[in-house]
Amino acid sequence: MTDSPLAAAVDISKRFFATQALDAVSFDIHAGEVHALIGENGAGKSTLMKIMGGVYQADSGEIRVDGASVRYATPAQALDAGIVVIPQEMRIVPAQTVAENVLLGQVPVRKRFGILPEVDAPEMRRQATELVGRLNLDVDVNTPVGRLGYAERQLVMIARALGRNARILVLDEPTASLETREVERLFEMIETLKSEGVGLVYVSHRLDEVERIADRITVLRDGRKVGAGLRGEFTQQEMIRLMTGRDLEQDYHHGGTRDPGKPLLDHEDVKLHEGEVVGLAGLLGSGTTEMLSQSGRCDRGRHRTGARRARAWSGDGSDGPGKHHSAEPRQAEDVGRAQQKGN
């Protein structure tokens, strides 16, 4: 880690109407380090990163890059300076190839017959192959991204950042939808980028990962910086106390048990009773959403609601008598539907 930071946010404040999102927060990132930024939802983490990435402008304070004060009016200006934010939501085009996604916005062009501009496909594939190779991603760059898994799509976005000569890479909850082996692969990639001098901001709620991967840790709470230090200077309990403002002696739980109320839903292995909360957990793509959709629309199988056996309902948002299904965002499906309508 170098003595001088690649970039620094100095006394940044930002207000959204009556909400003080950030209050004189300072944060910096050095070459070849992982600086973890932690805090509860609403603490100001994303707002701070969006200011550094040119999405928002601060009300007061300044951003410094290589010691010089800068003000980015657009994300494109931040990208030109080598500041790249990898958000949780995948910004990819599923129907396009890995090469097209990696070089999105900077596709190489050549002149046909010395006059007509056209995409230089061989050069695009060469550059994309080199970039994904830096991440040890073994994939044919001619493969449509829609055929890749979540972890591979994430690496495609990181390869795109490398193609923009990223000096600072912001990873926002990068392991939220990854399996254990995929997390290990991501950590290996992070170590590779550190060795190349890239500065990484690691935004996460997973404190085990923070303790393992971070060189430094900054804690935000209610828009204020409430703690900062090197890895090893905080225990997990101390991080939780800083994040929440209180000590958590034990996990929240219901004291005692009670008899369930009358059955409201009986669908295959999912049963729900009156006055009961049932948790259904799984990684992205594991089938939890499909199971919930089936419980309302009855795509397959049968289920009971109340004392009645129910069959197929129209799935127009209301999933039947007294039921509503709030679905997760499905950007890829929306793109697919739009393409089908266009055809």
Image (spheres, rainbow, N blue to C red):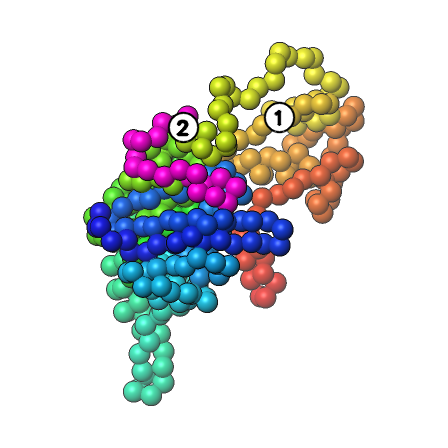
Q: Quadrant of the C terminus?
A: bottom right
Mark 1 or 2, nearer chain start: 2
Q: Residue at x 29, y 31 (%)?
A: 232
**Going by the image, does 243 lie left or right of 182?**
right
**Going by the image, does 177 lie left or right of 126?**
right
Q: Which secondary structure, mark 2?
A: helix
- Within 10 Å of disc 2 (Cα), the crowding (few <14, some 14-19, many 20+) is some
> Which of 116 and 14 lies nearest the eye of the viewer?
14
> Which of 39 and 69 lies nearest the eye of the viewer?
69
Inspect the magenta stretch and tell me whether residue 220 lies in it. Answer: yes
Q: Residue at x 71, y 47 (%)?
A: 316
Residue 242 lies in what quarter of the image?
top left
Q: Which residue lies under the disc numbered 1? A: 278
**Going by the image, does 102 lie left or right of 95?**
left
Amino acid type, residue under disc 2 in the picture:
Glu
Q: Which secondary structure, mark 1?
A: loop
The picture places residue 144, in percent across and down from the top left corner, at 41, 57
Amino acid type, residue under disc 1 in the picture:
Val
Alpha carbon distance from label 1 to label 2? 31 Å
The picture places residue 159, in percent across and down from the top left corner, at 32, 56
Q: Residue at x 32, y 56 (%)?
A: 7
Q: Which mark is residue 29?
A: none
Start-end of magenta stretch:
219-237
The answer to whether residue 163 is visible is no
Inspect the magenta stretch and tell me whether residue 204 lies in it. Answer: no
Q: Which mark is residue 238?
A: 2
Please, is residue 322 above or below residue 25 in the view?
above
